[in-house]
Image (spheres, grey):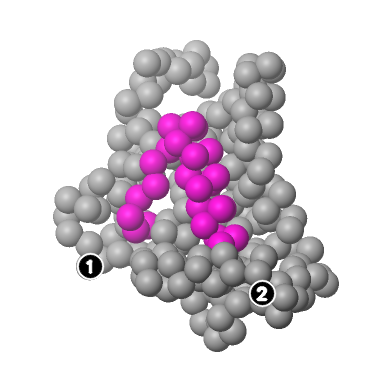
Amino acid sequence: MEMSGRKGLGVKADDLINQLEAGARKEVDERNPELAEEDKEEAAHEIAVAAFRYFLLKFTRTTVIAFDFKEALSFEGETGPYCQYAAVRINSIFRKLGDEAVASGEQLLAKTADDPGLSKSVGEILSGDSGTEIWSLLMLTQRLDEIILQCRSSAEPANLAKYTFTLAKAFSRFYHDHRILGEKDPVRRAVLIAVTMVVRKQLTAALAILGIDVPTKM
């Protein structure tokens, strides 16, 4: 695959990926020096591909693109690595929680319909400003199918790229505002885990459609 650069010079996509991979490797080395060499190489490649794919896909088809390596590789802002990092963080949360904690939360919420007291507690958690934030996040997760249909009808993958970033950003705000791992109240903890599970499913699916893998660590 070749791309048209400034002044009409031909630029190979593979060369861009190689340069992005070198930049991503520096980030991985700094953030996760304990990783094995093979794991560092794999993570750097996945980050580089995400940076490249997202940068190209976030623009509409008629936009003239000036590729910016620094912007594309940034872990902040509307970039592939930023979206990846949100998914990596979610997976890390579930590794730390463990299967037992997740199963316990699911079992607790399953009793809501038959337990008035539990139902009231869940209702209180989902009310007020905090509850509004949670509902807004859940509603956003449910827009994935709608966005995919929009992309098909308009032939504009930029819609999905924008949605993926919006979801990743919304989760980052949710994560900042709510103590998922440190929450002591079992009901609130169960609700937060359930919401995070929905976000993980939809965010991972959106990234996969964009051709972006989720590294184990970044």
Q: Name the residue under label 1.
A: 34
> In the visual, does 40 lie left or right of 125?
left
In the displayed orientation, state which residue is furthest to the right: 128
Q: In which quarter of the image is the C terminus?
A: bottom left
Q: Which of marks 1 and 2 is in front?
A: 2
The residue shown at (79%, 63%) is 132
Task: Classify mark 1: helix, strand or loop.
Answer: loop
For residue 176, say whether it is visible.
no
Residue type at mark 2: give it. Asp
Asked if marks 1 and 2 touch (Cβ < 8 Å), the reply is no
Residue type at mark 1: give it. Glu
The residue shown at (34%, 38%) is 19
> In the visual, does 2 lie left or right of 163?
left
Tag shown at residue 115? 2
Q: In which quarter of the image is the N terminus?
A: top left
The span shown in magenta is 194-218
Task: Classify mark 2: helix, strand or loop.
Answer: loop
